[in-house]
Image (cartoon, grey):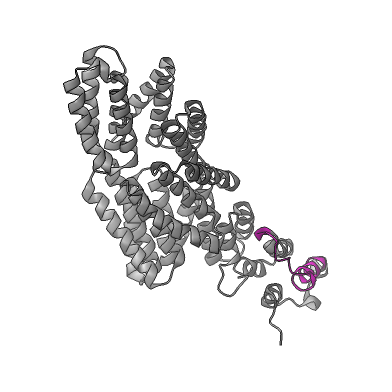
Amino acid sequence: MASLTAGQRLFAALEIDLDAVPIEYLDDYVAIEYFLILEDEPPADANNLEKVDRYLQVFNHLSEASAWQQASKVLSFRLEVDSKELHDQLRIWGYYYQQIELYQGLLGKVDSEQDLVCFWGLGRIFENLSDFSKSLDYYQQQLDLADLTKNRQAEAKAMDGIGTIQSRQQKYLEASASHQQQLEIAREIGDREQEGYALRGIGWVLFRHGLSQSKIREQQAGLNYLEASLEIAHSICNLDLESESIGDISRIYIERGQYAESVVFLRQQLDFCEKTSNRKLRQSVLGDLGECYTELRQYENALECLQEALKIAGELGDLYSEAVALNRLAVLYGYELQRYEDAIFYCEKDLEISQKLSLNQEIQIPTIINLFNFHAFLNQKEKADFYLKIAKSIAENSESLETKAIVVMALANAYWSRDRIWHKLFGLFLAAKGLLMAPPWRNSNGRIALQLTIAALTKSAKNVPIAITQRMKKFLNKSINHT
């Protein structure tokens, strides 16, 4: 007996009896039978959306017939026995708006368990679309319903989503508390998968907070948590968690300046993206690869990766990732290729998106400092001073040592570019202060700031006594060698 096609399997699961269908909905059910039984299977070269279009059509017809229980079966249908459920497969492929239609169509129509699936899915979608306020609202609704129905696993997942959004907004203490609560629930109910995701969340938050405060022990603790998450992923054969944990670990290698090591991890992730057609993950991996290739001075490879990352982010509607890609292109064009006009263009687009998303101003600091530097390189003093003034204002109200250090290094370069000897000496003092606040071997922003300081010092050294410049350059180069 020939095996059933995917359409035939779904038709059988729906248990449709055409003789019992109300006459006013008969056309809908006849259409369903056509899509699942009679219509030819899509050709082998069909794109992913074409492969699932018939199932989306079936969902719409069932919705028209108010057959919500049957419609929910479409949502959880698997194209292959070992593939993701349809709604989750759409996320992996990046078809967010089709997902939204499915979730919003079913919300409040079946039962609390289905609503929890919809709230979780909508939270992730709007997170991927960089609408963090709406994402947080859906995660909170999931948490409230999970608490009401005593669904501890859904409660843990909601805390994961809430913690992730808080981390994106750089609310690290709140994010840590959310993931810690997730971890406690996971261990209480013996859910290894949620335990792995909680460890990953705690690890990333610890690392980022340690980075912002220049605390090495906290950064190392974060790495330890991520490695524990990876170990759980291996033990339960969860490829998604494994890939996400590897991605976070590779990011830590980037921040530490270990670019070649990071490339090894990122290539593993890229292979995973190819196998699963995960566009969101591919975009993230390409962005990190682009940054690594930039630092390794493989500029052609860097440009190719970053341009594709920018393209995918735009296609997905992921504004946050688009801003990140634009910033990385600005760094490549400005600091490596000395194409300052192009760099300014990318910076301005990045800043425009960041302001549209109402992100924490501290997140905008690297872009603002880049604009200061690039305008300074072009001798556009008025514009450079404008951006430096904004950066100083943000740093004054910031609790992040990294943010303050970046601005101090920018001020050092501003003083160093002046003509008088005491200005240059004060610039040297500020450069040393910035290095002490956030040593360059601890994060990528510090390394860029240090490289700029050395470049500025070398360019203007003729105006400073040679003994001073040689001593300072020796100190700064020694700092670079720590990377």
Residue 437 in view in this figure: no
Magenta residues, start to end: 27-49
User: Which residue is pictured at 41% across the width and 63% down the height?
Assistant: 242
Q: Is residue 337 above or below residue 206?
A: above
Q: What is the quadrant of residue 313 in the picture?
A: top right
Q: Is residue 367 above or below residue 236?
A: above
Magenta span has 289?
no
In the displayed structure image, the side of residue 314 where residue 7 appears, left or right: right
Residue 378 x %, y %: 44, 20
- Front in this rendered view, residue 134 or 397: 397
Residue 436 x %, y %: 20, 35
Q: Is residue 286 above or below residue 187?
A: above
Residue at the extreme bottom of the image, as rendered: 1
User: Which residue is pictured at 45% across the width and 49% down the height?
Assistant: 289
Residue at the extreme top of the image, as rendered: 420
- Front in this rendered view, residue 77 or 203: 203
Residue 66 x %, y %: 70, 64
Q: What is the quadrant of residue 433 in the picture?
A: top left
**Magenta-colored segment: predominant secondary structure:** helix
